[in-house]
Image (cartoon, helix red, strand yellow):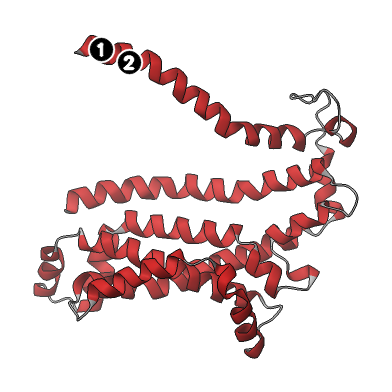
Amino acid sequence: MKAVVSRGKYFIYPIVVFLLLILLFPFFVMVSTAFKPLEEVYANPPHWIPREVRLQNFVDIWSKYPLGAYFRNSFIIAAGTTLLNMALCIPAAYAAARINFRSKSLVMYLFLVVQMFSPVIVIISLFKIISSLGLLDNLFALVLTNGVFTLAFSIWLLSGYFRSIPKEIEEASLIDGCSRLQSVVRVLLPVAMPGLVTTIIYTFITAWNEFMFALTFITSMEKRPLTLGLYNFIGRWTVQWHYLMAAALLALLPVVFLFLFIEKELVQGLAGGAIKG
């Protein structure tokens, strides 16, 4: 049996490597184009490895375009959305996990139904609502809409993690004199750290990559997030691919660094949850 399994690995590994190469190929093209001069971008046949590594591309996009402002706006939107989402979804998820009420299952399934709808369906209605609130061309409009559209999945995800934590942990803290709020903050949330981190990552990345709401609600150049700012490199007759790919590469870095930073917290939270459980 072991011999059959070991022989099977020789067939599985090449398939996995081949699929990884296909998935990573667009990222390779992006990195390669980001370091090319413009004339080499349009070379035929293409040069997969830049013959001239041009770091000036990254200098140009910072000096010729307000890329710093785009990064700042995207960070404000993503961080604000994450804070709003966590402030709303933690009590809602706790209530869904610990409090029994009529039609609880129906409510949870409705959360999933809401998540199924594309924002395109309600974009006109949202525009009218945002306009009536006087929030057009305001970053808070993007924080609000992104927070609303990430809330349903966050509640579903976090409530499932809360349900997996034994009630006896909270009951022990209540016996020791903690209030319900103290029990949640001091006991439940530290144990639920892996679920919290997963929710934070999902919310932040979703808000960081959002495009349609920003295109609809933001008109000022200085208030554009990074996803809209990348359009500066797409002209009517030509596309500055070397600048576009350089900016896209920089746009990936905050998300990558966030994941690498939170990965430690995720592992620690899993270990702590296992010990406390």
Q: In which quadrant will I find the N terminus?
A: top left
Q: Please provide percent x and percent y for residue 165.
A: 19, 59
Determine the CA span between mark 1 and mark 2. 6 Å
Residue type beneath disc 2: Gly
In contact (CB < 8 Å): disc 1 and disc 2: yes
The residue to which callout 1 is attached is 4
The residue that appears at 72% across and 73% down in the rendered structure is 218
Label 1: element kind = helix
User: Alpha-carbon neighbours of circle 2 within 10 Å: few (<14), some, or many (≥20)?
Assistant: few
Between 170 and 163, the residue placed more toward the observer is 163
Q: Please provide percent x and percent y for residue 69.
A: 74, 63
The residue that appears at 78% across and 34% down in the rendered structure is 35
Rendered position, 102 above or below 108: below
Rendered position, 263 above or below 129: above
Left or right: 37, with 207 as reference point: right
Quarter of the rendering containing residue 174: bottom left
Label 2: element kind = helix
User: Alpha-carbon neighbours of circle 1 within 10 Å: few (<14), some, or many (≥20)?
Assistant: few
**Residue at the far bottom in the pictured view:** 132
Q: Please provide percent x and percent y for residue 182.
A: 24, 75
Residue type beneath disc 1: Val
Rendered position, 258 above or below 94: above
Between 178 and 152, the residue placed more toward the observer is 152
The residue that appears at 48% across and 70% down in the rendered structure is 83
Between 1 and 276, the residue placed more toward the observer is 1
Between 76 and 46, the residue placed more toward the observer is 46
Left or right: 51, with 120 as reference point: right
Q: Please provide percent x and percent y for residue 209.
A: 60, 57
The residue to which callout 2 is attached is 8
